[in-house]
Image (cartoon, coloured by chain):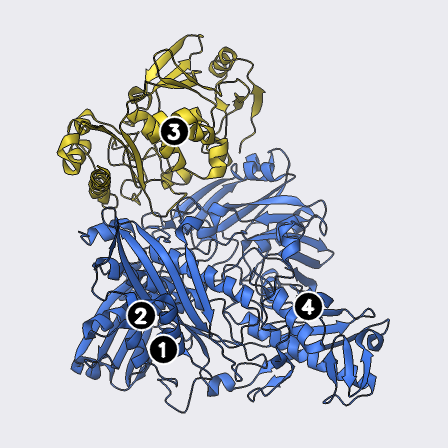
Amino acid sequence: MKPFTYSRATSVADAAKTAAAMQGARFIAGGTNLLDLMKLQIETPTHLIDVNHLGLDRIEPTPEGGLRIGALVRNTDLAADKTVRRDYGVLSRALLAGASGQLRNKATTAGNLLQRTRCPYFYDTNMPCNKRKPGSGCGAIGGISRSLAILGVSDACIAQHPSDMAVAMRLLDAQVETVGADGVARAIPIADFHTLPGDTPHIESALKNGEIITSVTLPKPIGGTHVYRKVRDRASYAFALVSVAAVFGKDGGGRFAFGGIGAKPWRTPAADAAASSGAKAVAEAALSGARTTYHNAFKKTLVERTLASLYRQKEARS
Amino acid sequence: MKFDTPATTNPIDKGRVVGVAQDRIDGPAKVTGSAPYAYERHDAAPNAVYGWIVGSAIAKGRIAAMDLRAAEAAPGVLGIVTHANAGKLGKGNYNTAPLLGGPAIMHYDQAVALVIADTFENARAAAKLVRIDYAPQDGKFDLNTELDNAVKPPDSGFGGAADTAVGDFEGAFAKAAVRIDQRYTTPDHSHAMMEPHATTAAWNGDKLTLWTANQMIAWSVGEVAKTLGIPKDNVRLVSPYIGGGFGAKLFLRADALLAALGAREVGRPVKVMIARNQIPNNTTHRPATVQRIRIGADKNGVIDAIGHEVWSGDLPGGGPETAAMQTRLLYGGANRLTAHRLATLDLPEGNAMRAPGEAVGLLALEIAMDELAEACGVDPVELRIRNDVQYDPEAGPQRPFSSRKLVECLRTGADRFGWSKRNPTPGKVRDGRWLVGMGVAAAFRNNMVGKSGARIGVDGTGKVIVETDMTDIGTGSYTIIGQTAAEMLGVSLDDVIVRLGDSRFPASAGSGGQWGANSSTAGVYAAAMALRAKLAEKAGYPADQAQFEDGLVKLGNQSQTLAALAGREGLWAQDSIEFGDLDKRYAQATFGAHFCEVGVDIDTAEVRIRRMGGAFAAGRILNPKSARSQVIGAMTMGAGAALMEALEVDTRFGLFINHDMAEYAVPVHADIPEQDVLFIDELDDKSSPMKAKGVGELGICGAGAAVANAVYNATGLRLRDYPLTIDKLLKAQMT
């Protein structure tokens, strides 16, 4: 860990302004990812702005009939929230599939959206990694890549986005609300929030310099049967090889989002459109453009089979 | 005391304390955090400063230049140790690569510097400022491409001969009615013990004390002395509490050496812990294996020819993974062949991990037996019973087993598990989305013994005190040693004080190879016999007639208290157990049978263990409670080997890339359901006066194969490449 300075933000606007003014400043909330990365000097902020005291920890209805989730709502609290459990079951299930109880107690909503990849080459500072050190190359391409992404990847980076929560939010068409350094608020559709690696894999979101997440809003509930299925090497406390968030409607329709396979939480309209045609068709649509390695090619099969499992269970229920 | 004839009735046979389930006597100290571990010896070494290890960024080559200026100028830095200022260092007998590398680099993350600073954080931050220019060289990192270059290794001390052959294996195999000939592979494994390697070091003049986490105190005193070039008498090791070892802490490692060098450099105590993400590449691991097993049998499954060949790799000067060892002893058959071949690799050094040899050998052999059972149409439990042999099948009937209850383990274990409910046709049992299957595997682990000493005394209050350099690596040594002393002297366990893990105490066998429990308690037995003689003499009773009960020494109606006999100054005795040739005349081993039921998701191929059960015969079970803990822990490790554990080799850069606990998966609670453990009654009078054998490693031996065989029974997919992960099951075209 490199020495850094620390301050406590007094307001959202103050946090954004300070972050924009100080090069190398980062916000800190739960710290469950950032602190680990700082110890390894993968992240080397010169200044930490503690935002834990800004409020932003409420879950409340929106005038549109949806839900606004404060940026600092802890994963444990969000998963346990009565409204979330009743109306957005897929989100609660995704959260509980992630990390461990201890980590969920600390991890925040905004921090979870911004958590960084688990690519092993990103974690070893002796290895090439364009995401960690732009221009150094990609160790994972041609290396060990079993856990890595097959969608949205580039020649520069095949890192996967590790979040479960973000997959459910992608499914629910969440919006990420922010305040910029200039004090101006905006809402970013989650589809546009995470960016693809292209040749700048070190840039992972649409956030501008100093911009701070204040909340995530969910549109009004969509009904249907909410499921989150996470497939991993052990029964708990592991990142997804493949995860599927799905909502099945009574009309035979459905919508799908995927984790563990994309450079960002993955969703495609074509997959939703294929919902009534079954697992194989949904998988085919979702996997359009997939680029696999020798190690992670199985993820294509696994996506289809995970969907098949969800359809099988759906049919068993009806 | 020399143990060279089978034990007869002795005080341990009373079974008043020994053999009775006991809570750990060190449990309260551990759960209250008052048991000090190596990195927390603020009491013993106040004012310690912190060392952080810089590991090599390349796998092979040389350091061309080191620039320490930035690191030396960093806040709080007190000194830096490198090859340039460490002085001449030797190399321990049990180390393959030097623990401090440079200028030559032998493996990735080999230590090349220790940065010492006033705080942990300053040391870690400054370590990043050490600038090193490397001149890398090409290395060999892929076992598969080096198989043809593998050579016959020298015979090893623990593994015995590299190759053995009896009868005409090739001829008999060619003629056999049923033949199995398959290749199996196991990956590199990391010990992943809870406490990382850690040491606090302090010099007092030319005397060095290391508070460290080490399984083998006496070995390691010698290794420290040899490496530093100082007399053994100037080295003290203290290791009373150890947070798991599994073989990772059998040896002197970089934490201890560099803490010693660091403390000398800065003239005050230094503590060093190997960071979790340095452990897989800096320290030792269980080497990957490629195994070929050939079994020829008649149509009833009776083996006539059995061959097991093993390939593994290590750094130059290293040793093989002796995975064919159990095949020399486990099943009958007149025509036999075993062979080990060793390739040179430039990966981090391989060495012992829990049940070296058998743990991975049985992963392969016990699948092969499952395949033979199916080929012959014989139940897998019955097949193993048909091939039981009561003597060393390489040596012949003149070398019988000291005790061998494999058949009882198989039969009793099968009954308890409900084996008869297994459908022998794979892929036929469904429970919702799960395909369900059962598997069995034999458990086998050699019983090794070693010289072990202790001293034992009674103080003026009647408390019994035992001191030995034996270690407790979480296994329960404190308690079984206390039980042994209590039994021998006729006191309650509460009246025994056990002190372990200090090189000032008599040298013990240490903790390794599951020899520790039996050998160290036998050493306590020997010392206690000497003390009994002294106490009886002081009481004026004939030593062979005195009874030790209720804190008294008795003869007929007369009695005297231990406290009174010991007097204010106390009474002490010291002795060692030394083993004769009973382990040559008799094959000595521990046996068991593992059973497992798994569910495999019909779609996703996720494997979930539903039940594990086993029956084990390992001589007298000294403490059934901690023995069970050892076995279920080892079964869990076997489940990890079967389903998830693998160090992934990047063959371009020459390292294990998944070198942290996020990416090297070991089982979590949710992976391990009910585990049933039954110990079969057994006393082995040829093993030691305790009539015990080891049990700490037996539980991993075969456990993973039972899982793999259950996966086959569930799915009909035979995987021979561990671990059995989802990608491999899907590739095997699960339908």
Estimate the x, y position of residue B217 in percent, counting from the top left.
61, 65
Tell me which numbered mark, 4 or 1, is placed earlier along the sequence.
Answer: 1
| Label 2 residue SS | helix
| Label 4 residue SS | helix
Q: Colour of chain A?
A: yellow
For badge 1, the amino acid type reads Leu
| Label 3 residue SS | helix
For badge 3, the amino acid type reads Arg
Chain identifier of the residue bearing label 4 in the image: B
What residue is disc 1 on? B330
What residue is disc 3 on? A85
Tag 1 near tag 2, CB within 8 Å: yes
Q: Marks 3/1: CA distance?
A: 56 Å
For badge 2, the amino acid type reads Leu
The chain displayed blue equals: B
Estimate the x, y position of residue B584 in percent, counting from the top left.
47, 85
* Relative to B578, residue B706 above or below: above
Tell me which numbered mark, 1 or 2, is placed earlier along the sequence.
Answer: 1
Chain identifier of the residue bearing label 2 in the image: B
Tell me what residue is drawn at x 63 percent, y 80 percent.
B14
Residue lying at the far bottom in this picture: please name it. Answer: B398
| In-image side of B190 versus B18 (left or right) | left
Tags 3 and 2 on a common chain? no
* Relative to B380, residue B248 above or below: above
Look at discs 4 and 1 and give the one toward the viewer.
4
